Image (cartoon, coloured by chain):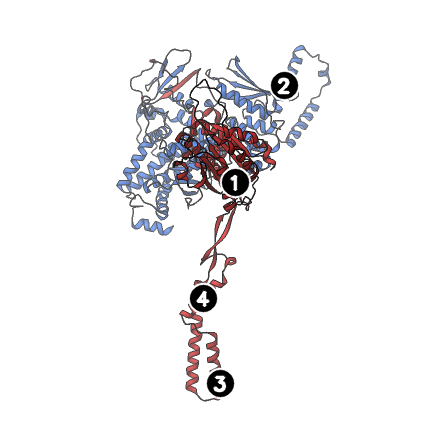
Chain colours: A blue, B red
Amino acid sequence: MTTTVTAGRDDPLLFKDGDWDFDTLSRIYDGVAEIGDELKLDIYRPRIEVITTEQMLDAYASTGMPLFYRHWSFGKQFVRNETLYRKGWQGLAYEIVINSNPCVVYLLEENTATMQTLVLAHAAFGHNHFFKNNYVFKQWTDADGILDYLAFAKNFIADCEEKYGQAEVERVLDAAHALQNQGIHRYPGKRQMDLRSEQKRERERREHGERLFNDLWRTVPEGQGKKAKKRTTERDRRRALLGLPEENILYFLEKTSPRLRPWQREVIRIVRLIAQYFYPQRQTKMMNEGCATYTHYEIMQRLYDRGRITEGSYLEFLHSHTNVVAQPDFDDRRYYGLNPYALGFTMMKDIERMCVDPTAEDRAWFPDIAGNADPVETLKDIWANYRDESFVSQFLSPAVIRKMGLFLVTDDAGEKDLSVDAIHDERGYMRVRRALARHYDVSRHDPDIQIVDVDLEGDRRLVLRHSVVDGVMLEEEDAERVLQHLANLWGYEVHLTEENDKGDISTKHTAEPVHPFV
Amino acid sequence: MYIIDRRRDASGKSLGNRQRFIRRARALVRHAVREASKDRKITDTGKGGEIVVPVDGVHEPSLRRSSKGGSREYLLPGNKTYIEGDSIERPPSGGGKGGASGDGGGEDEFRFALSDEEFIDLFLEDLELPDLAKRQVMGEGKDQPRRAGYRSSGPPSSLSIQQTMRKSLARRIALKRPKVDEIAELEAQLKALEDEGGHDDQILQIREALKKQAKRSIAIPFIDPVDVRYRRFEMEPKPVAQAVMFCLMDVSGSMDEHLKDLAKRFYSLLYLFLSRRYRYVEVVFIRHTHEAKEVDEDTFFHSRETGGTVVSTALEEMIKVVHDRFPPGVWNIYAAQASDGDNLPIDNEKTVSLLKTSILPLCQYYAYIEVGREPEERRRSVEPPTTLWRAYDMILSPKLPMAMRKVRDRRDIYPVFRELFERKSNAASTGA
């Protein structure tokens, strides 16, 4: 490695033309890493893998992971992508990066040397830093263990297929996949008591009760109300024992479902844990891309400033970068929602501007960071401690709202027309910002469905409730199908009611197991 | 930091998933394949292609919020003229403008390409050859090594000593390596001279020579790595079984191009089918009028003969060919006869008995296709059976590996083919 660095000193250019080989690649990496160190990025050691387009298609199919258990839905994904790609309707990503330690970065062999530089800066430094430092990832994912876990999952499911037949395993996976968005712990929750501490607490309570014992209380007559109360406490006790209400349906099934066999529970657990692993990515999509884009921009800029890449490749980089951060207007034919790269990059660039060259408005809105003259450290703090929703609600500045011309449109099914509720003006900034934060709040996208009760002593019926927000119901057909899967997993009848915050029940779904797992 | 070149790694990691998907959507895909192959040429039957299945069949449901109803917020970029309080007319198709169209569930069809293999497999899936119990199973159908000369590297176990020694010998001769005898002789001489005493010059000379020889022996090794030869093997697929397919056709004047075309399509399909089942398929074409002859494919389909129609001649010719070249113990024999149903009435008896006593015992399967035209006048709704049909009909029994069908149009071919080889039709003959 030292030799390449010295070679780099002799000739500042990392590469001359578009071609690259593995020496060039490691030289490029060193060049990029030098600036990464300057920025004090804290990354997992990267493992860079050069792959072909075909392998890229393979990687697409297994959600980018280098190994995954087998299931037909990935095959479906694969044939779809393959067809789109072969027909030229869809290009391939230049890279895929995996939140693991070592951090796996796939580079497409077709990339030019400039693109490899860009991609290394973007993925091996930008995303990598974000994965390692962001609190959501820290809290919910285990980068050291994920590859091993996936290997375990793959083998476990392959073994099950061997033992119980592909069809049987597929049925469990189908059902578990249908519920995977409901297989996520969204909050750390309270620690489960183990038996010993439970007993200890019970003993302490009894002692406490003995100390305070007074026989007189026994003679106080029981009122009518007390009996009713007792009945509700019975129900409460049952629910508390089962940990209800529970929004992690897969978790509940894994622990409580009366009819599943151990291997089926394990399969559900695998689906659940993998869904959990991907959950942070959904929460931080925009920030993650913004962080990576900001990082690659910074690195490429500095490389160019020091004459380490040619003017030609700098232009090539700018061309590609501009494409990535393009945000078509809402009335543009190409408009397909907010581009996370664009918004993330714009906001982070804006934060940089506020740190270095703040206006009076910035000082009023962001007194903490305006003019602190250390944009990189400020951003690194933000990358570590926020997710999309909190990032927007904290840092979306009026300047960005004006620049992007963000406006809020409300669509009420009861009204004839849509109405513009807020635009980029003094009255609107706050509302736009709040609305955008809600837009990035993943828990508002996923319906809030909880298991509220189950009668284990009676007919074992499982009762779920969807708390309707803003009058948006569940997609009916899908709900029926998922409920069927759920009933099969549970083994008994399942009820799902949809009710709004006033408690009005609007829809009821019921499913009986037709083909339960036994 | 490591850099790993993965490009050499096997791709096709998704193959397993792909197969699972196709199996999952099997019924749909099979239907789509059947639809797609209706419009194809027979020669294209073996090729892959794009198919379309309804997306509903491979849908993965999830609990998600409906895209309709309720009140929603959209946050859009690029405001130009709107101010707070403006109202916008609702776009027609609902949510067309909305940013929340991330579900991507807008398609009704799922379109993807099948490989050649997958296409044919599905195409032929629910057909099953009658009497698949092979008469002659030659090995397990796996690749077997075959000698294929020598090579200079390989595992020790396949070292060819003979070749190695041969190379070594040639090299030793060419480089003039001193032979053992020569050295022994010189040594003997030396010893003799030493014993004799004196001859210092000669001794010195011989010593010199010996030294040289010894050096040479070391420099030119007895066996050099370049001599070493290993036996080379090539893996050669060993045919699981081989089949011969006899195409018998009446080419008398009454068989016109249309009828021949129908027959040809049937043969192609049969060929395709057999070539899937057997590694090696021979095709024999026998055409007949009042006399029969084995011909090549081109002549078979394109030349025209005149004469009467005597079916038994073709059967006799077939028996002859079988005895000459295709011993039934080694070959799976299939025969497909196409005719418009004409036969010389007095020949019927002979034909039937030949078929019964000689042909059918030889054959795995015998298919008779009677080609014809759509009846022109509607009023003759029931055609009288032809001479040959009537004759064959008499011997037809579920126990015999024989089937007969009428074909009127190109579209009938495939269904007929399916019917002919459908599992149920040979349920009785599986015992054979």
Front position in the image: B176 or A209: B176
Indicate the position of residue A2 as horizontal and vertical percent values: 37, 51
Residue bearing mark 4 = B168
Give the structural element (helix, strand or loop) at label 4: helix
User: Left or right: where does residue A122 sit relative to residue A74?
Assistant: left
Q: Are marks 2 and 4 on the same chain?
A: no
Q: Which one is in front in this view, the residue at disc 1 or the one at disc 2? A: 1
Front position in the image: A431 or B341: B341
Which badge, 3 or 4, is on the more N-terminal residue? 4
Indicate the position of residue B149 as horizontal and vertical percent values: 45, 57
Which badge, 1 or 4, is on the more N-terminal residue? 4
Front position in the image: B27 or B417: B417
Is label 2 in contact with label 3 (beta carbons under 8 Å)? no
Total marks placed: 4
Indicate the position of residue A54 as horizontal and vertical percent values: 41, 39
Label 2 and label 3: CA atoms lie apart by: 119 Å
Residue bearing mark 3 = B192
Q: Are marks 1 and 4 on the same chain?
A: yes
Q: Amino acid at mark 4?
A: Ser
Label 1 and label 4: CA atoms lie apart by: 53 Å
Q: Are marks 1 and 3 on the same chain?
A: yes
Q: Amino acid at mark 2?
A: Arg
Front position in the image: B8 or A422: B8
> Is A222 above or below relative to A310?
above
> Is A415 above or below relative to A385?
above
Residue bearing mark 2 = A235
Residue bearing mark 1 = B333
